[in-house]
Image: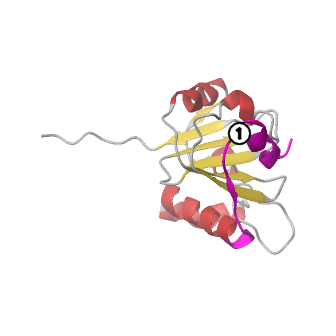
Amino acid sequence: MQAANLLKSLGIEYTPLTEEQILAHKKEWIHRLLPLEKHEKAVEIYCIPKEDGYSDYLWHAFSFELLEGLCGDAARQGFNNICRGEAILLSNWDDAGYHIPDTSALTADELEKIADIVLTSTDFQWTYAKTHESDLGPYLFKIERTKRAN
């Protein structure tokens, strides 16, 4: 199922992104979530597109262990339990991206209907990535906020 069709079927409002907005989001994702020393490796493993025609997948950052998070059922459960809101959905096989003002109607089960996606809060506090590989993922990364001492 295409991502747009899933969003429509769930009655979720969305705005399509341009190719330039999608690429900018991917670059910002790498900049915000990966340590600086891992940025070059992220390019090497096709987290963002290169000119050689190979597909790019942000979730490679998880499968190549550049970013640690929950995996499998723990990721699904974690995703269903996080407080969600505004997000960007990148659908790799559709070569499409969408801004979603409210993701509260999305569950891990619903996202299983899409072949390969990365869903990230607009403030980059969490990312849920579902791959097209049956033995990889899904993955959930969440920035843990530290409590300040009074």
Q: In this rendering, would 111 be left or right of 41?
A: right
Q: Is residue 65 magenta?
A: no
Camera-side residue: 109 or 32? 109
Q: Is residue 86 above or below residue 83?
A: below
Rendered residue at 61%/31% (across/down): 75
Quadrant into which the C terminus falls: top left
Residue interval drawn in magenta: 1-20
Q: Is residue 77 visible?
A: yes
Q: Is residue 64 visible?
A: no
Would you name the residue on which mark 1 appears?
A: 11
Residue 49 is situated, as x and y percent measured from the top left of the image, at 75, 67
Q: Amino acid at mark 1?
A: Gly
Camera-side residue: 66 or 106? 106
Q: In this rendering, would 14 be left or right of 131?
A: left
Could you say which quadrant of the image residue 97 lies in? bottom right
Rendered residue at 68%/68% (across/down): 23
Q: Is residue 2 magenta?
A: yes
Residue 36 is situated, as x and y percent measured from the top left of the image, at 49, 64
Q: Is residue 112 above or below residue 148?
A: above
Could you say which quadrant of the image residue 80 lies in? top right
Residue 117 is situated, as x and y percent measured from the top left of the image, at 73, 46
Quadrant into which the N terminus falls: top right
